[in-house]
Image: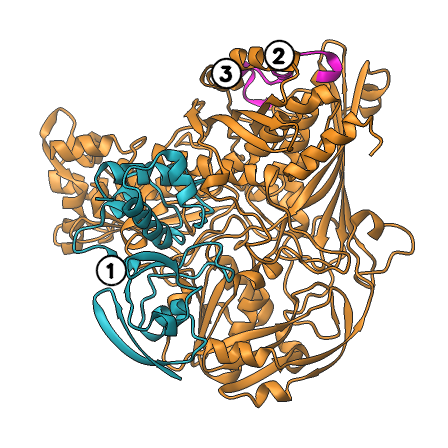
């Protein structure tokens, strides 16, 4: 018992190897595409090859006559049955939310939009038949540039025009902040369009049995999908089961309620057989929602000593052709983060959501916060140059001091904890900051053809989405709570049911650690269940770095209830008053008589037998808890990047990368470090490699992984990571870590590149900073801006 | 239809296949070897990597008919009761998160170590260039391959 006790006490903060791994490294994983049901048919889609056109005819006869084809449907064939895909976040009262049928009926508005679906006996036959669908298109002009889209006389994506909404925020006296400010710096930054590229392509399987449907989907949000199928497509909620089996990454891209999910359900009902659809990568690049795609005009006003007076942000955000689940809300998740870690007198932001004839945008790792962090961290460097000040010193002069927490920012958020001094000091030390600055100066002085640049990102983010009342105030269509339940099995083993839905984050391991810590049962005795609405009927799922900071806290509440119930039974077993019992390391003991005790696992068996329970006590230790956070959490950190820029080729090499993150208390440092690594990689990818590109006709030219550069091991550096800890204000002290690296690293890298080439008079290079773009920027600067 | 005979993870199969059938679809859909996933359609991602006659290939870029007579090892057949040293190292170094790239990554790493039992970090990174991972940022994959090398996986 003693050994178990010691192990249990050490659970939090322990680098437990993952429970998930055994199936993942031996090929026994249950991906959606692995599912094969008796009689199962396969769907394939005919998709629009043009960006914008009227549909004047859909002829399915050739497709229907292909061998092995069971059925084919156009959007018109499904009619009212296919309804409209919902947008859950109408950010303003007068927002334009156009109808969004799962398959286009009258008009297509982006390349890849589904026009017809065929159902065949195997995936090859389905693909053959989809290629035989004959659609007549009457071309309409594409709308590809947000700024042109808002101009008078632009072709329209929708009848209502190209503006979806305008959302504004203002706090403080902007006129006073900017009028007479000694220094005002203004920049315009481009957040290029990104394609999420989770390694597992989307896949769905739908099966009806009687009037009940089961949908397997490679999704982050099985509970939201169940609700949406019921609320918007008329299937009674009690008849819908959604299962997210093993899911191969999401990064926000699987935080969606998709046309393909709806169509799988409708088509399988029509044909009376289970159907499966798995996208190809090129189909996915076209039709999985994209991320970012904003123009950011940002102005900052400061005193001569560097104190920030005010910040003004004007955003254009590309919605794409339709508003999907949370499309319009993504920029708003960043809207409160432009002030970041800095104190200032005034702040205003205007965001205009714009329709274009491109794939809709929506959540992608960080969702709004990477954009905000990039703009503020970039312009802090620009302001430092303008002031002739060391960029870290400028940040330090303006950031919230550790003794000032809790601190309510100009954007109205109350940061509960943080220690920017500690994270920065540690990062500088690991990075060798002063030494690198000396080397940089020396290389600049001798006109080295390979320049050294140092990039800083003292980022923060808001995560732990989210207090339901705040979501309500932002017109979001749901709450932000999370659910957990604990089932104490007769043999003392534990089933933990969580409403968050992991897809690589390691919940089965980390959740086991939390419960082992709370209940004092061995880590090995715990099984975590998730991702199936029959097993886990309540949940808000996994996104926005919320699982631990919300779902983890639900787990703690559920454990409390188990302990409370067990205490009453323990008291009866030990013939003591509940008030005289202590609970530690999984064991109740009588105060003053440590020999008299019972473990919670023994109590589970006694509860199951139920022979000697006190009168009126139910024979169950099981519990449910739903936790609604009262605040966001605010991870932060200091990331430092050293780049070498070959001025003759434009090649950028990351020489070193140091990340010191404060994500609060850490449950499993191994998993946290892995999240930071992967996050940094995705942020570097935005800085250097990735861009979703449409040509002038609106064709996506980066539809394959040959054209869209997801970096390999050879394209990325090694990272040095460490942590500082300022516990969050919740019971576990946890903040969340899923998005931190991505939010932090993009500006760190670009700041480093600009720092390297600033001696040439360059103050911006549009992302991704490819060798060609860097080289051209240098050439242009050397030609005196003539090119 | 064409007749093929192929050995997969030590079991012999004989099947009639369409000439255009990809090896990865043969593995997954004809003989039920779903341990090997498909991540792209341009042979960039490497998720579908298997050993064909002892050498790593991307099974989306091989036709089933080309595998006629071949001996294929998938992730499901890599361990022989005990986990392969590369599998163990991936677990111990937390070199996987969602795990979708992992079967291909492990097979490619095993092949890399067969070719070069003691690679430098740079050689590991170059050697795994054909396998994409979206979760780990590769840091722990490099550590895992190094650990497997130290454990003698390439010998």
Mark nearer the N terminus (2 vs 3): 3
State the residue position of label 1: B77
Q: Is residue A389 magenta?
A: yes
CB of mark 2 within 8 Å of CB of mark 1? Answer: no
Chain represented in cyan? B
Chain represented in orange? A
Question: Which is in the foreground here, disc 3 or disc 1?
Answer: 1
Letter of the chain that mark 1 sits on in the rendering: B
- The picture quadrant where one finds residue A323 is bottom right
Residue at the limit of the structure toward the right, as seen here: A153
Majority secondary structure of magenta residues = helix
Q: Residue at 58% x, 83% y: name it.
A: A72
Rate crowding at label 3 as few (under 14), some (14 to 19) or many (20 or more) other CA atoms within 10 Å: some
State the residue position of label 2: A441
A726 w.r.t. B41: above or below: above
Q: Is residue A390 left or right of residue A19?
A: right
Q: Which mark is residue A565?
A: none
From the top left corner, tell me how far across and down residue A656 is, in percent.
Answer: 49, 25
Question: Which is in the foreground here, disc 2 or disc 3?
Answer: 2
- Which of the pair A623/A366 is nearer the observer? A366
- The picture quadrant where one finds residue A297 is top right
Letter of the chain that mark 3 sits on in the rendering: A
Q: Residue at 23% x, 73% y: name it.
A: B12
From the top left corner, tell me how far across and down residue A190 is, in percent.
Answer: 72, 39
Cα separation, mark 2 vs mark 1, equals 56 Å
Q: Is residue B104 visible?
A: yes
- Which of the pair A100/A38 is nearer the observer? A38
Q: Residue at 33% x, 43% y: name it.
A: A511
SS for dot 2:
helix
Q: Is residue B105 left or right of residue A658?
A: left
């Amino acid at each position: 018992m003693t050994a178990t006790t010691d192990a249990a006490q050490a659970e939090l903060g322990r680098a437990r190897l993952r429970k998930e791994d055994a199936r993942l490294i031996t090929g026994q994983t249950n991906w959606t595409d692995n599912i094969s049901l008796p009689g199962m048919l396969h769907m394939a889609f005919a998709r629009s090859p043009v960006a914008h056109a009227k549909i004047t005819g859909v002829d399915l006869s050739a497709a229907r006559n292909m061998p092995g084809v069971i059925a084919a449907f156009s959007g018109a064939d499904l009619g009212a049955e296919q309804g409209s895909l919902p947008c859950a976040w109408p950010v303003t009262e007068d927002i334009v939310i156009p109808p969004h049928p799962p398959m286009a009926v009258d008009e297509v508005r982006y390349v890849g939009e589904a026009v017809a679906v065929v159902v065949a006996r195997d995936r090859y036959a389905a693909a053959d038949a989809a290629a035989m669908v004959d659609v007549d298109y009457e071309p309409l002009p594409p709308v590809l540039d947000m700024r042109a889209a808002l101009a008078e006389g632009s072709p329209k994506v929708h009848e209502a025009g190209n503006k979806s909404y305008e959302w504004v925020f203002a706090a403080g006296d902007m006129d006073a902040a900017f009028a007479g400010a000694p220094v005002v710096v203004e920049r315009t930054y481009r957040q290029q369009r990104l394609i999420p590229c989770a390694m597992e392509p989307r896949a769905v399987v739908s099966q009806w049995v009687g009037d009940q449907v089961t949908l397997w989907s490679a999704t982050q949000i099985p509970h939201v999908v169940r609700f949406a199928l019921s609320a918007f497509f008329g299937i009674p909620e009690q008849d819908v089961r959604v299962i997210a089996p093993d899911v191969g990454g999401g990064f926000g891209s699987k935080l969606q309620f998709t046309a393909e999910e709806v169509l799988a359900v409708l088509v399988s009902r029509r044909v009376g057989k289970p159907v499966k659809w798995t996208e190809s990568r090129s189909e996915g690049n076209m039709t999985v929602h994209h991320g970012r795609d904003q123009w950011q005009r940002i102005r900052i006003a400061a005193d001569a000593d560097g104190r920030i007076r005010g910040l003004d942000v004007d955003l254009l955000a590309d919605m794409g052709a339709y508003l999907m689940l949370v499309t319009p809300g993504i920029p708003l998740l960043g809207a409160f983060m432009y002030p970041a870690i800095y104190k200032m007198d005034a702040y205003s932001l205007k965001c205009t959501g714009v329709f274009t004839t491109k794939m809709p945008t929506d959540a992608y790792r960080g969702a709004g916060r990477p954009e905000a962090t990039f703009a503020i961290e970039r312009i802090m460097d620009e302001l430092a140059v303008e002031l002739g000040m060391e960029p870290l010193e400028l940040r330090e002069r303006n950031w919230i001091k550790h003794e000032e927490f809790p601190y309510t920012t100009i954007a109205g958020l109350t940061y509960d904890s943080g220690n920017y001094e500690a994270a920065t000091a540690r990062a500088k030390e690991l990075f060798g900051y002063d030494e690198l600055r000396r080397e940089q100066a020396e290389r600049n002085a001798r006109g080295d053809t390979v320049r050294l640049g140092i990039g800083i990102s003292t980022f923060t983010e808001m995560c732990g989405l989210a207090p339901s009342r705040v979501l309500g105030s932002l017109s979001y269509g749901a709450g932000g709570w999370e659910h957990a339940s604990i089932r104490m099995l007769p043999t003392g083993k534990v089933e933990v049911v969580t409403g968050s839905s992991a897809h690589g984050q390691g919940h089965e391991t980390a959740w086991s650690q939390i419960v082992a810590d709370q209940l004092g049962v061995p880590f090995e005795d715990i099984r975590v269940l998730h991702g199936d609405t029959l097993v886990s009927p309540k949940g808000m799922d996994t996104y926005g770095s919320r699982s631990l900071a919300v779902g983890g806290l639900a787990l703690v509440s559920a454990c409390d209830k188990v302990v409370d119930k067990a205490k009453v039974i323990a008291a009866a077993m030990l013939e003591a008053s509940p008030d005289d019992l202590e609970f530690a390391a999984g064991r109740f003991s009588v105060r003053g008589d440590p020999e008299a005790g019972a473990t919670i696992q023994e109590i589970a068996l006694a509860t199951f037998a139920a022979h000697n329970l006190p009168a009126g006590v139910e024979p169950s230790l099981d519990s449910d808890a739903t936790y609604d956070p009262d605040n966001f959490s605010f991870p932060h950190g200091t990331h430092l990047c050293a780049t070498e820029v070959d001025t003759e080729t434009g090649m950028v090499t990351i020489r070193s990368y140091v990340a010191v993150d404060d994500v609060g208390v850490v449950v499993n440092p191994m998993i946290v470090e892995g999240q930071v690594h992967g996050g940094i990689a995705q942020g570097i990818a935005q800085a250097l490699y990735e861009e979703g590109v449409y040509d002038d006709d609106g064709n996506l030219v980066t539809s394959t992984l040959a054209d869209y550069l997801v970096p390999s091991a050879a394209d990325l550096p090694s990272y040095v990571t460490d942590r500082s800890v300022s516990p969050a204000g919740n019971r576990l002290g946890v903040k969340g870590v899923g998005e931190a690296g991505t939010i932090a690293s993009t500006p760190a890298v670009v700041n480093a590149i600009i720092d390297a080439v600033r001696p040439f008079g360059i103050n911006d290079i549009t992302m991704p900073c490819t060798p060609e773009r860097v080289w051209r920027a240098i050439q242009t600067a050397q030609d005196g801006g003539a090119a | 239809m064409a007749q093929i005979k192929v050995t997969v993870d030590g079991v012999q199969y004989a099947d009639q296949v369409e000439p255009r059938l990809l090896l990865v679809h043969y593995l997954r859909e004809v003989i039920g070897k779903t341990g090997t996933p498909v991540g792209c359609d341009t042979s960039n991602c490497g998720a579908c990597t298997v050993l064909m006659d002892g050498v790593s290939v991307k099974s989306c870029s091989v036709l089933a008919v080309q595998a006629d007579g071949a001996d294929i090892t998938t992730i499901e057949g890599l361990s022989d009761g005990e986990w392969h040293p590369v599998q163990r190292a991936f677990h111990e170094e937390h070199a996987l998160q969602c795990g979708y790239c992992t079967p291909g990554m492990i097979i490619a790493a095993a092949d890399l170590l067969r070719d070069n039992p003691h690679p430098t970090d740079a050689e590991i990174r170059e050697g795994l260039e054909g396998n994409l991972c979206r979760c780990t940022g590769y840091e722990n994959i490099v550590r895992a391959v190094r650990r497997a090398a130290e454990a003698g996986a390439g010998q």
